Amino acid sequence: MKTPLTLAADLPNEYFTWEKFKVWWKANELQSTTKFPAEAFQDHPIFSRAMDMNKSVTGVIDIRTMKYLFWSGNVKQLLGWEDQDYIDHGVQFSFTKFHPKDMNAIGYFTQLIHSYYQNLPEAQRHDYRNYWDFRYLKPDGGYIIILQQDTVIDHDGAGNISTLLIFVTDITNLKKDSSRHLRLTNGKENLLYEFDTLKNKPAELICPSHREIEVFQMLGQSYSRQQVADKLGIELATIKTHCQHAFEKLHVSDSIEALGLLRIFGLI
């Protein structure tokens, strides 16, 4: 899949507006409201208990209204802001906390998400997931890096996402400030994108092969390269080649970076 979007070197300030954000998410294009009322989430004891136990903040978004139908009870612990802020002010409250230099990446990734989801056959949409990261402002004025994992609960007749289940995790110690990433998957294929926030430049990455991921799975279990080679019955030089190919595909310089990226985006 070739990257279908390009961005100018310098985008106008209006690119950062709330109205533009709603256009990215096609909120005004939705043909119907969500079929899932807020009560379906907030009043279900098993759902609420499971979400509260999760280390991630969990939310359900009605895209048409840009309101949260559900926020799990650990929001303040992870993000620093009160749960009621999100309930009262919706996604617009979150929008004001995004790092300004990440907004081009957020806009670019949002358009990729919609394009990919709309072009999936209906049978594959059930297994759709996306993973993306961005910087998020905390009450003390500092930023953390957030990984957001999205699952589509519902869409309208045109394939526009209308209800979204999100999982938000703090990955500040695992990710660099200089680039944002997106993974799109239908359960079988993986598409990876990178957005260099310093150069304002997007790129499509090549997903490592099954064998390359297998090597990094074992390296992530603290096996040495020689031990991985022995277990797979191949030469050490071949392991080194697999690692180098993965570095090139992921635009990273070493195994630590590669392992971090593969883990964060659910590939190992």
Image (spheres, rainbow, N blue to C red):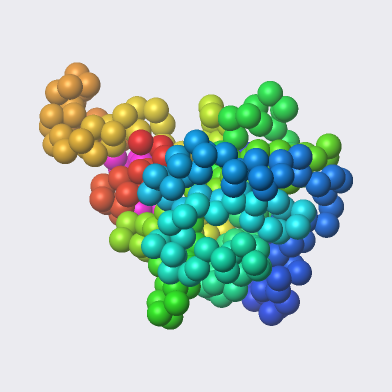
Residue 141: image location, x then y, percent: 43, 80
- Seen at 17% across and 22% down, the residue is 231
Left or right, 105 with reference to 252: right
Could you tell whether 24 is left or right of 249 in the image?
A: right
Instruction: Tell me the magenta residue range.
Output: 243-252
How far from the left and from the top, in percent, is residue 127? 58, 30
> Which x, y percent locates residue 172?
36, 62
Q: Nearer the viewer, residue 86 or 171?
A: 86
Res. 154 in view? yes
Is residue 246 or residue 268 the one in the foreground?
268
> Does residue 67 lie above or below 88 as drawn?
above
Left or right of residue 64: residue 4: left
Predominant secondary structure in magenta? Answer: helix
Q: In which quarter of the image is residue 7?
A: bottom right
Q: State the residue lying farthest toward the top.
A: 233
The answer to whether residue 116 is above or below residue 112 is above
- The residue closer to the viewer here, 109 or 84, is 84
Quadrant where the image shows the N terminus: top right
Residue depicted at x 26% and y 50%: 256
Please give the name of the residue rendered at 72% of the width and 53% of the height, measured from the top-left corner.
63
Residue 94 makes an appearance in the image: no
Q: In which quarter of the view is residue 104 placed?
A: bottom right
